[in-house]
Amino acid sequence: MPRDRKTTTCSFGSSSRTDGSGDVLCATEEEVYAALGLPYIPPELREDRGEVQAARAGTLPRLIEVADIRADLHAHTTWSDGKLSILELARAAMRRGLRVLALTDHSVGLGMVNGLSVERHAEQHAEIQAAQRDLGDRIRLLHGTEVEIKADGTLDYPDEFLATLDLVVASLHSSLRQDRSVATERLLRAVRNPHVDIIGHPTGRLIPDRPGADLDMDAVLAAAAQSGVALEINASPYRLDLEDAYARRARDMGIPLSINTDAHSEADLAMLPFGVATARRAWLTAADVINTWEPDRLLDWLGKRGR
C-alpha cells in the first residue's frame, strides 16, 4: 500500500500517559518516526548499523533509486551464452530507459559458455558498430568483455587486447575452492591490472548452491581503493554479490561501485531492483554508483583507466 507522507499525525489513546504506557495509533510508518522525533528511516537501513544515530544527526543519506540508473555495464548476447542479439538486447535496454549498454560476452577460456576468441571479438565489434548506426544516439553501445580470472590470477586475454576494448569486467567463475591466500592473491592481480575497469560479482558465488571464494576482503578493498577499479553489485538474485556490508565499506573507502544485471535475456534486465536494494542496504547514494553518471562522464572515466 503506498504511503501518504502528508496524512494525519499519530493519535494517543485515552490510556496513554507521559510515562510511555498506553496506545499510540499511527496510520503510517512516517508518523511512527515523527512521534519519536526522528525523520523517516527507509526499511533497508534498519539493521542497527548507526541509522538511528544518523537520523538524530540529520545525516541519513538520500538512497539510490532504480530511476537513477542510466547504464548497464555487464550483459551477454548470443555471441556467448545470452539469448538476444546485440540489437535485440540494446532495444530491450532502451525500453528500460538506459542510455549506455556494455556488451560483455565471456572470454575464450570459458568454452562451456561459447567464450569469444580475439578473432571473434573483431567480428562482434563490426556488429556492435552496425547496431550503433541503426540506433543512432538513443543509446551508447560499448564493446567490452567479461574476462575470466584464471586460477593463477592471469587474465584470459593479453593486456594488449584488453587495451583495445571500451570496458573490461574481470570475474571469478572457476577454482573457487582455493585456499584463502591463493584465492585472494588471484583476485588482487585482477584488481591491480590497469586494463580492468570492474570486478564482476567479486566472490563468484551462486545462491543457494555455490559458496563464493574465500577471500580476504580487507586486502581486496584496500587494493581496490588504491587502484580505483570499480566493484560490482551483481543484481541477479542468484548472486547479489558484492554483499551490502562490503559495499558499504567500499563506499566509505571511496571505491567506485557498479550495479549491473549480468543480463542474459530481456527478463534479466528486470532484476535491476535487486541490485539497487542491496546498494540501499549499503547506504549508497546515486553519487556512489558509476551507472548513474551521464554518458560523457562515464566514458571519460573509462578512458582514463589504462587506455
Image (spheres, grey):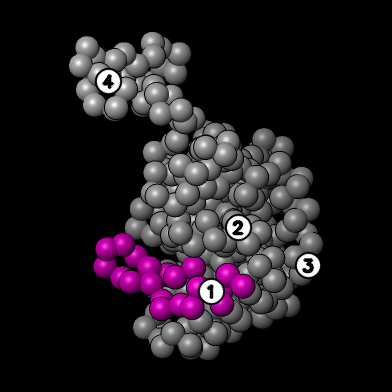
Which badge, 2 or 4, is on the more N-terminal residue? 4
Residue 75 appears in the picture as rendered: no
Mark 2: which amino acid? Asp
Tell which tag, 4 or 3, sits nearer the viewer. Answer: 4
Q: Give SS at disc 3.
A: loop
Q: In front: 171, or 230?
A: 230
Q: Pointer 3: what residue?
A: 307
At x 41%, y 76%, the residue is: 213
Q: Mark 4 points at which residue?
A: 17
Nearer the N terminus, badge 1 or badge 4?
Answer: 4
Q: Residue at x 39, y 14 (%)?
A: 9
Neighbours of disc 4 within 10 Å: few (<14), some (14-19), many (20+): few
Question: Which class describes the residues within 10 Å of circle 1: few (<14), some (14-19), or many (20+)?
Answer: few
Q: Are marks 2 and 4 in contact (CB under 8 Å)?
A: no
Q: Would you name the residue on which mark 2 appears?
A: 252
Q: In which quarter of the image is the N terminus?
A: top left
Residue 124, quarter of picture: bottom right
